[in-house]
Image (cartoon, rainbow, N blue to C red):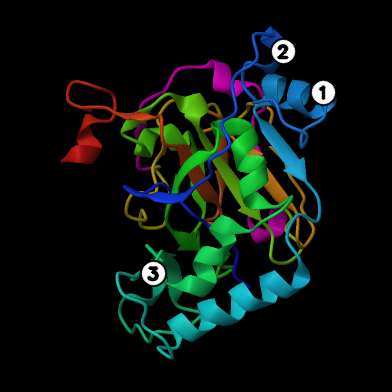
């Protein structure tokens, strides 16, 4: 069953004309004033840097996204610019299908999938505005595979490792569960409060299976560190910040504020990614 991921792009996904401003209150420095988030939710996000919202996306929308994903995998449609990534375990005898495609990148020209980035009312966009403001940028989609063999498992990492822009609090990731998600299926595992740590060195994990391209993890990660598995039901969405240490399979979605600044990664901890 697929699940959605969107990531930043070089063009706005949507621009709303209502401007929101940061409150001077320390409690709310990481969220913006709105009628969406309660004081309790804003405090929880400030302390932990993640927030779970139940039943945010409708059953109808999830089914439409699933069908479009399958259509792309089966070559029934071919949106311009879309990039497919396959599972490493299928490399020798790859036959394109829902079972063998690991990710669909850059789906912005597919009107059906890109609706996930612009769902109206109290859905994806309204919550993103609470964290990043109204000017947003977005881009790609992934699915939730369950093939075993660590074919899609992502080691504990910080998303900011992949992003050549700052600040971290101007970017928020979201997951929308398209079916019940739990530990055995690769749900999000997190270390609440780790957003207070700086960006750390990342590289390929020392696993028995072959490393998956660009699936980097923390080089100094302590496997005994306490972790929390976020169990989600179909339609639930979780939001979290990119310095937050977490692990998963490839099932997330990201937006960045248009006010974020791109940075030169030379002589920085991310320089090897540029190469």
| Inter-mark Cα distance, 1 to 2 | 9 Å
Query: Which label sits on residue 109?
Result: 3
Q: Specify the quadrant of the image occupied by residue 60.
A: bottom right
Query: In 3D space, how far apart are the residues under numbered discs 3 and 1 (Cα atoms)?
Result: 37 Å
CA neighbours of label 3 inside 10 A, class few (<14), some (14 to 19), many (20+): some
Mark 2 and mark 3 residues within 8 Å of each other at the beta carbon: no
Q: Which residue is mark 1?
A: 39
Question: Which one is earlier in the sequence, the residue at label 3 or at label 1?
Answer: 1
Report the residue at 65% width, 34% height from top: 130
Distance from the alpha carbon under mark 2 to that under mark 3: 39 Å
Question: Circle 2 is placed at which residue position?
Answer: 27
Classify mark 2: helix, strand or loop.
helix
Are the residues at dot 1 and dot 2 in contact (C-beta closer than 8 Å)?
yes
Indicate which disc, 2 or 3, sits on the residue closer to the N terminus: 2
Membership of 51 in magenta stretch = no
For this rendering, which residue is in front, 154 or 65?
65
Q: Earlier in the sequence, mark 1 or mark 2?
A: 2
Residue 29 numbered mark, or none: none
The answer to whether 248 is drawn above or below residue 99 in the figure is above
For mark 1, does the 10 Å Cα neighbourhood hold few (<14), some (14 to 19), or many (20 or more) residues? few
Query: Residue drawn 45% across and 78% down?
Result: 100
């Amino acid at each position: 069953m697929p699940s959605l991921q969107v990531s930043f792009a070089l063009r706005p996904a949507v621009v709303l004309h209502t401007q929101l401003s940061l409150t001077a209150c320390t409690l709310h420095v990481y969220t913006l004033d709105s009628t969406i988030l309660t004081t309790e939710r804003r405090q929880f996000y400030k302390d932990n840097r993640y927030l779970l919202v139940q039943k945010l996306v409708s059953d109808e929308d999830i089914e439409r996204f699933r069908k479009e994903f399958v259509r792309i995998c089966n070559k029934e449609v071919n949106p311009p610019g879309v990039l497919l990534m396959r599972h490493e375990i299928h490399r020798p005898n790859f036959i394109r299908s829902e079972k063998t495609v690991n990710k669909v990148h850059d789906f912005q020209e597919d009107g059906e999938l890109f609706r996930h980035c612009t769902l109206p009312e109290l859905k994806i966009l309204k919550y993103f505005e609470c964290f990043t403001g109204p000017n947003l940028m977005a881009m790609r989609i992934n699915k939730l595979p369950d093939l075993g063999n660590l074919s899609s498992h992502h080691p504990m990492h910080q998303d900011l490792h992949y992003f050549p822009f700052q600040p971290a609090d101007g970017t928020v990731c979201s997951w929308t569960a398209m079916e019940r998600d739990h530990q055995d299926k690769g749900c999000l595992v997190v270390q609440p409060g780790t957003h207070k740590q700086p960006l750390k060195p990342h590289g390929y994990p020392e696993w028995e299976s072959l490393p998956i391209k660009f699936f980097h993890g923390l080089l100094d990660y302590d496997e005994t560190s306490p972790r929390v598995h976020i169990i989600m039901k179909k339609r639930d969405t979780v939001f979290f910040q990119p310095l937050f240490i977490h692990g998963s399979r490839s099932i997330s979605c990201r937006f960045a504020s248009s006010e974020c600044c791109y940075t030169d990664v030379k002589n920085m901890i991310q320089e090897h990614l540029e190469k």
